[in-house]
């Protein structure tokens, strides 16, 4: 991709239908920490590790909105199940729960998202602007953000 935001980016596609697709970039770190976001929202964290968690740049669309990709055992109103193992919640409540040790076991917080119109993502995939890799929770949550692109490329689906 020529756009510098998307160059060497790993996008986790949360939703894909005939109407388009929505995903979050999971290897673009912002200068902020989750503690900064919680403080701005007048929320507190009981866990110092949570306060130091990175805030990701999820994409260029609506960067004022926050999204949490998380393990699927956590459910609230508005939680979108992605595949039975990973879910996404975009609410103040999920952040409050994370800060009070009542949130999901694993999570990533991102500001903004990447969006594609009908057929747009399919076209970009056909031009090899993007490669796909099977979703694996350890790739989403556990891998080193700085090395995530290389790890995703090593696991990408190759055409035969």
Image: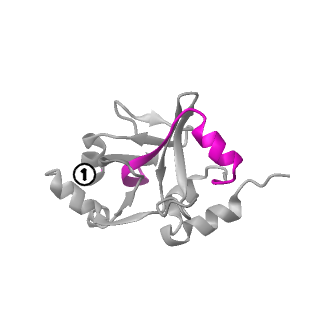
Q: Residue 40: percent from the left, percent from the top?
A: 16, 55
Residue 54 appears anywhere in the view:
yes
Is 34 left or right of 73, judged from the image as shown?
Answer: left
Residue lying farthest front? 2
> Which quadrant would the N terminus be assigned to in this image?
bottom right
Residue 1 versus residue 91 in the image, above or below:
below
Boundaries of the magenta span? 101-130
Q: Residue 53: percent from the left, percent from the top?
A: 34, 64
Residue toward you, 7 or 79: 7
Residue toward you, 149 or 20: 20
Total marks shown come to 1
Residue 26 versus residue 64 in the image, above or below:
below
Residue lying farthest top? 18
Residue visible at 29% across and 40% down in the picture: 91
Is 68 left or right of 115, judged from the image as shown?
Answer: left
Q: Residue 75: percent from the left, percent from the top?
A: 39, 36
Residue toward you, 45 or 60: 60
Residue 8 versus residue 114 in the image, above or below:
below
User: Is residue 128 rendered magenta in the image?
Assistant: yes
User: Residue 49 falls in which quadrant of the image?
Assistant: bottom left
Residue toward you, 39 or 4: 4
Residue hosting label 1: 100
Residue visible at 48% across and 64% down in the picture: 4
Is 101 left or right of 8, judged from the image as shown?
Answer: left
Q: Residue 30: percent from the left, percent from the top?
A: 35, 65
Residue visible at 56% across and 66% down in the picture: 148
SS for callout 1: loop
Colour approach in the figure: one colour
Residue lying farthest bottom? 146
């Amino acid at each position: 991709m020529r756009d510098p935001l998307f160059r060497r980016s790993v996008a986790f596609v949360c939703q894909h239908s005939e109407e388009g697709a929505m995903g979050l970039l999971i290897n673009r770190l912002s200068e902020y920490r989750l503690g900064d976001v919680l403080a701005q929202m007048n929320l507190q964290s009981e866990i110092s590790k949570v306060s130091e968690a990175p805030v990701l740049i999820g994409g260029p669309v609506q960067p004022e909105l926050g999204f949490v990709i998380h393990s699927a055992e956590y459910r609230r109103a508005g939680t979108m199940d992605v595949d039975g193992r990973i879910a996404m919640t975009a609410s103040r409540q999920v952040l409050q729960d994370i800060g009070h040790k009542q949130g999901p076991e694993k999570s990533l917080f991102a500001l903004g998202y990447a969006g594609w119109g009908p057929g747009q993502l399919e076209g970009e995939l056909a031009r090899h602007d993007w490669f796909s890799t099977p979703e694996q929770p350890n790739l989403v949550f556990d891998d080193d953000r700085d090395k995530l692109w290389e790890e995703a490329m090593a696991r990408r689906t190759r055409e035969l």
